[in-house]
Amino acid sequence: MIILQCKDIIKYFDGQPLFSNVSLQIHQGEKIALVGENGSGKTTLFNILNGTLDYDSGQIFTAKNISFGFQAQHHDLDLNLTPMEELRKVFKHIIDLNDEIRDIEKQMSTANKDRLEKLMTKYSELTEEFEASGGYRYESDIVGVLRGLGFAADELDKKIHQYSGGQQSRISLAKLLLKKPDLLFLDEPTNHLDINGVLWLENYLKEYKGAIFLISHDRQFLDNIVSKTLHLHGGELMKYSGNYSFYIKERRAWEQRVAKEHKKQQQHIKETEEFIRKNIAGQKTKLAQSRRKQLEKLEKIELTQSEYTTDFFFDVGSNSGRFVLTVKNLSFSYEHTPVLKDLNFIIERNDKIGLVGPNGCGKTTLLNLISEKIPIQKGEIIHGHNVQLSYFSQTRDDLNPNNSLMEEIWDKKPAWKEGQVRAYLAKFLFTQDDVFAPVSSLSGGEQSRLALAKLILGKGNFLILDEPTNHLDIKSKEVLEEALQQYPGTLLVVSHDRYFLNKVTNKTIALNDGSARSFLGNFEYYQQKMADERWEKEQRQKERDNIKKQPPKRKSKNSIKKLENEVQQLEEKIAETEDSIAQLEEQLCKKEVFTNPTKNAEVNDAYERQKQELATFYTQWEELEEELSQQNQ
């Protein structure tokens, strides 16, 4: 069933058509992505389809009794309510039903026999409707969506005005999802979400029963949700019957075919023009004239204009030492609230590390500590030999909003002439009068490109990037990914873009509850390791549950004593292993070790083995303690 159809939509901008003759259909339950470079008109078309923007020509048809839902740029939340109170508005019909049921219950307690029979009939109808509408689960639905989008249960009592702008956007998204419209319009829904929130939203939308029309720069998010991709480019809409990866494959194949046909046609034109030139005044004049007419009527094959023509790379001024960064027993608190607790890790030259964790876990705090933007409270951060750090802040603190783009580059390269600055800015798509615009006039994506342009000029051998892909379109992300893959230095990056992390990083540090864990692989590897651990934990829990279901057996004093001895032995092993780890950490910081690649590799391997062994000992200790506790009951 078609729920929305548009035919030959035209929209003008400054007298020029932004797009022409756009036609599409959206079917019930269909999940569609709209892609295209920044400025192609995606958001304009998106708003035309959801009814918030007029169009200049064409027709739009919608099926009867179809509900639309979209997240307005300026949300309609009541800032004086809590999130729970605000989201209960979505279920006003259910709440009114419940009030009516409670009222009938009161009437039934005092009604006579005839009146009671009517009330009981009405009561039965209302309770049936209440149950069918989800009356017994709507409160848990609200909590479930809020938790999925990153809100802890203990922070839902605050008024909405006490939350940040990003948190308010998440509350607005939660309200939209709970409405469950037949056609859901989502424009960059993963903004303001951490990776856990993105994963939850992805799973929610995969199971969503209605249709979805989606704009997103998160490629993995698109791949896992949509079954059709629309590409808006040069004012035209191209349709692909697959997800984002399918679209990329088909688009590139089409571009290659066009390029091949263009080359073939150009050769034909060249040969024909040569024939005309040689024969127009000779014996074959008529044939030459005929060829000329054919050439004039020939429909020229045009090459598609590249969506993104910039190219850049990161270089280093000089190499750092083997050990770039050593973090020892690092702790940090905000107003007596612990954020980081006893962190210990080492970053070596050419490591490309993704720093991941839920919102508020301390990722940006850790980056600020490493880059010396805030002072250390407890522990040590040791920068290695010849480390030259370059930092990209997600708030773009290094940009002066009052400066022009030219002035921003001159701050880094005062000896450059205007032509050099212009040529450099052109690599980042800033041309002509753009270079004289103030930084404050730039969009988020443009500011990110300018900040990257400045970062590259620093030639740091240790890059720290905090959400570098925010506001970048997909093509810009791809260029950045390629540059970072070829970067000859060391990288520490925070990002909620899983595709980006998988392409760029080779190690992962996960922050959670103030602690840090290191994984020797990219984000996909980290996810698999965590899934394996959850499965193992579930299996151990099942085994314990099965033991509990078995009839209790009388335990001898000898068996209890044996368990106690095993616990004591494990505790001794744990203490010995912790001492060994501490000694290895000290060795890793010694000059004779970190300057000797062979010795360093040996010590580092021993260090990782000891950490894995310690984790195993702790798991065994917990299991023995629980078994001992059960036997002592």
Image (cartoon, grey):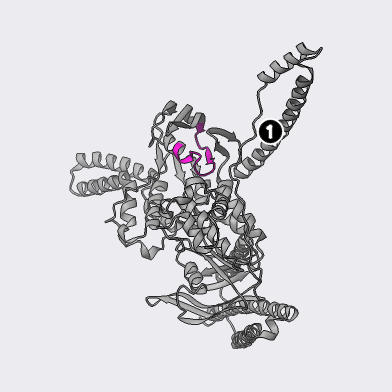
Residue stretch in magenta: 25-44
Asked if residue 190 can be seen in this view, the reply is: no
Front residue of 629 and 478? 478
Q: Is residue 133 magenta?
A: no
In the rendered image, the vertical position of residue 184 relative to residue 578, given as above or below: above
In the rendered image, the vertical position of residue 11 relative to residue 626, given as above or below: above
Question: How far across and how far down the image is residue 393, in percent?
Answer: 49, 63
- Along the horizontal axis of the image, is 156 left or right of 286? left
The residue drawn where x is 76% and y is 23% is 272
- Along the horizontal axis of the image, is 128 left or right of 42? left
In the rendered image, the vertical position of residue 590 relative to residue 301, given as above or below: below
- Along the horizontal axis of the image, is 21 left or right of 482? left
Front residue of 326 and 391? 391
Q: Secondary structure at mark 1?
A: helix
Front residue of 519 and 289? 289
Question: How far across and how far down the image is residue 184, in percent?
Answer: 45, 41
The amino acid sitting under disc 1 is: Val
Question: How far across and how far down the image is residue 203, in percent?
Answer: 52, 51
| Quarter holding residue 122 | top left
Label 1 CA crowd tier, 10 Å (few <14, some 14–19, many 20+): some
Asked if residue 254 can be seen in this view, the reply is: yes
Q: Is residue 34 magenta?
A: yes
Return the residue at label 1.
258
Question: How far across and how far down the image is residue 57, in percent?
Answer: 43, 26
